[in-house]
């Protein structure tokens, strides 16, 4: 084994392998420079309420004790693992990048470092190509899957489109920070080529963008065993494009961040769309055979009784459209106030969430009335989807 590694994490959950492949755009270049290593690590979704078995990170070993390891970070617990490794292996230089760090000012990250980091742990905020002085998206995209995965297994893997959300104004999101670096790394249309991997099982391609722009639709090929999954805004921009596009979307899973479907709250969040915009997009996506997962947030600190009434009215209205439930699912999460976002400036205290030296933010503390509104909101949402 060479003393240079390019490490990518993967995981198995919900009967599917999830690959966070950060080196596919430069695979051959990286493989010529060092060895490629897949490392199996659980991600935070497997633990309730962000509770992690911290001791499990201490027991994870690496195949050598001296050299350089380049690591793509997609989740904060992966960064925490790198921190543990950097302390455990002082003769290895860890160079970490990826979506958690990409394009952000390293002096103004969306997590706070509460104590000094090991000197052999380095953060970079550029693409792999830029770090090695290569032009973005000029190498052949490639993916070799981990040996553990069998031909019939289902997998999810990454395919980058652009580096951030085109909207970037939602107050709870990391993109809302005015101190973000605004540069955009976007895959050129003529670089979106057929994706070939040596795997016969079902594949889900996780499109690397925080908000999918419909203009990419006709640039993504349809495959017999591939599906696409991506975050999707439900504004008039998306609606207008979809109305003039004839592509069938039966190979798309769209994750729509509706958060709290009351216009007063959508304005507060600076979502840039209305409840009616969401419904119109949902109806159109359903007619094009897309699968939709809607994300809701409860546990807000500023709800009023009228919001609860309007939440009920929203689902009554939605019920009238008779959208098949098999094509629609939901995720309901408690509000998490991320560090260095515009919402963090409004809600500064709560129950802290951190990994070792990395402070990520907090869950707000609710008074009695807001706890009651939170539970009412959960009951109304669940009643629509579960009945």
Image (cartoon, rainbow, N blue to C red):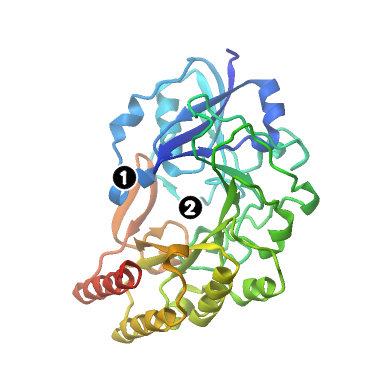
As drawn, which residue projects farthest toward the left?
368
Q: Is residue 129 above or below residue 301?
A: above
* Residue at 28%, 45% in the rendered image: 51
* Residue 104 in view in this figure: no
* Viewer-nearest residue: 200 or 314: 200
Instruction: Tell me the residue that label 1 is attached to.
Output: 47
Picture quarter with the C terminus: bottom left
Left or right: 26 with respect to 203?
right
Give percent across and percent down for residue 266. Answer: 46, 77
* Residue 269 in view in this figure: yes
Picture quarter with the N terminus: top right
Q: Is residue 305 above or below residue 21?
A: below
Left or right: 87 with respect to 192?
left
Left or right: 326 with respect to 387?
right
* Residue at 42%, 57% in the rendered image: 338
Instruction: Tell me the residue that label 2 is attached to.
Output: 110
* Residue at 66%, 71% in the rendered image: 242
Mark nearest the camera among 2 and 1 is 1
Please give the label number shown on residue 91. Answer: none
Left or right: 332 with respect to 366?
right
* Viewer-nearest residue: 386 or 261: 386
Give percent across and percent down for residue 56. Answer: 31, 30
Q: What is the distance, in whole Å, between disc 2 and disc 1 at their CAs?
A: 22 Å
As drawn, which residue projects farthest toward the top?
1
Which quadrant holds residue 67? top right
Q: Secondary structure at mark 2?
A: loop
Which quadrant holds residue 114? top left
Decide: few, some or many residues near mark 2? Use Cα within 10 Å; few <14, some 14-19, many ≥20.
many
Q: Secondary structure at mark 1?
A: loop
């Amino acid at each position: 084994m060479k003393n240079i590694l390019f490490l990518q994490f993967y995981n198995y959950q919900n009967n599917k392998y999830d690959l966070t492949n950060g080196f596919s755009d430069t695979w051959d270049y990286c493989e010529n420079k060092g060895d490629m290593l897949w490392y199996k690590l659980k991600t935070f979704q497997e633990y309730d309420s962000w509770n992690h078995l911290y001791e499990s990170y201490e027991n994870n070993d690496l195949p050598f004790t001296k050299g350089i390891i380049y690591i793509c970070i997609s989740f904060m617990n992966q960064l925490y693992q790198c921190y543990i490794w950097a302390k455990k292996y002082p003769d290895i230089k860890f160079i970490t990048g990826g979506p958690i760090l990409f394009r952000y000012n390293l002096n103004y990250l969306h997590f706070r470092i509460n104590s000094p980091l090991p000197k052999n742990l380095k953060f970079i905020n550029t693409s792999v190509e830029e770090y090695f002085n290569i032009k973005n998206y000029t190498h052949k995209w490639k993916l070799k899957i981990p040996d553990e995965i069998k031909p019939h297994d289902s997998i999810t893997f990454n395919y980058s489109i652009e580096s951030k959300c085109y909207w970037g104004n939602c107050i709870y999101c990391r993109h809302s920070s005015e101190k973000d670096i605004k540069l955009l790394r976007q895959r050129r249309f003529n670089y979106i080529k057929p994706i070939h991997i040596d795997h016969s099982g079902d594949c889900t391609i996780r499109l690397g963008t925080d908000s999918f722009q419909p203009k990419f639709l006709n640039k993504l090929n349809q495959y017999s065993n591939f599906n696409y999954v991506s975050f999707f805004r439900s504004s008039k921009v998306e609606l207008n494009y979809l109305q003039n596009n004839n592509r069938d979307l039966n190979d798309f899973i769209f994750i729509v961040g509706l958060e709290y479907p009351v216009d007063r709250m959508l304005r507060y969040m600076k979502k840039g769309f209305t409840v009616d915009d969401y419904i119109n997009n949902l109806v159109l996506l359903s007619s094009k055979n897309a699968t939709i997962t809607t994300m809701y947030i409860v546990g807000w600190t500023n709800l009023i009784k009228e919001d609860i009434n309007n939440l009920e009215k929203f689902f009554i209205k939605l019920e009238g459209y008779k959208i098949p439930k098999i094509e629609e699912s939901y995720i309901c999460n408690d509000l998490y106030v991320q560090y260095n976002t515009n919402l963090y400036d409004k809600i500064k205290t709560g129950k802290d969430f951190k990994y070792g030296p990395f402070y990520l933010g907090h869950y707000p503390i609710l008074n009695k009335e807001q706890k009651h509104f939170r539970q009412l909101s959960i009951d109304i949402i669940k009643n629509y989807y579960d009945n």
